[in-house]
Amino acid sequence: MISERRLLQGVVAVACLVPVLTGIDGVLRGAAMLRPGAVPADLDSHFRYLSGIFLMLGVAFAWTIPAIERQGPRFRLLGAMVVTGGLARLLSWAAIGAPSLPHRLGLAMELVVVPLLMLWQARVAKRAAGIDQPGNEKSCRDLSPDNP
């Protein structure tokens, strides 16, 4: 039987493909990946910069996979970055109008999937620490980094 931890690791690994592959595409093709034709240099520069950040965000999430049960703070920080980007995308939708389907799917990933993954990671971390198992509670002192 596959453990919940292993299942979470697999789901996060698959989810990491989105920012990694999209980031690489954006870095290599620039804003032209959205619409062929002439693109202003400043727009292309900014798009490639953000694509590089997006790429690294996916890599950073991938780094959490091997010890995902111990990566709560990092996982939450990365997740907060994604959710903030999703809120910015939502603002664009309200101000400018609905984006294309791939961007709406991105919004669902940013505001639904990633928060659910954050909750799941917290659950796996609690289970790994023995916090939610009856008779196996650990004190906050037992969980401190100085007390292995």
Image (cartoon, rainbow, N blue to C red):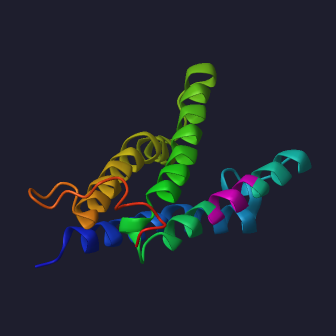
The overriding secondary structure of the stretch rendered in magenta is helix
User: Image quadrant of residue 69?
Assistant: bottom left
Q: Give the percent coordinates (x, y) of residue 33.
A: 68, 57
Whether residue 38 appears in this view of the structure is: no
Q: Give the percent coordinates (x, y) of residue 129.
A: 28, 64
Viewed as shown, does residue 20 lie left or right of 66? Answer: right
Return the residue found at the far top: 95
Q: Give the percent coordinates (x, y) of residue 34.
A: 66, 51
Q: Which residues are magenta?
A: 50-56
Viewed as shown, does residue 78 lie left or right of 116? Answer: right
- Where does the C terminus fall, quadrant-wise? bottom left
Whether residue 55 appears in magenta in the rendering, the answer is yes
Viewed as shown, does residue 112 lie left or right of 124? Answer: right
- Where does the N terminus fall, quadrant-wise? bottom left
Residue closer to the observer: 26 or 148: 148
Q: Give the percent coordinates (x, y) of residue 90.
A: 53, 30
Above or below residue 110? Residue 70 is below
Residue plotted at (69% across, 50% down) = 35
Residue plotted at (42% across, 68% down) = 147
Whether residue 79 appears in this view of the structure is: yes
Residue plotted at (63% across, 24% down) = 96
Residue closer to the observer: 96 or 135: 135
Whether residue 45 appears in magenta in the rendering, the answer is no
* Total count of labels: 0
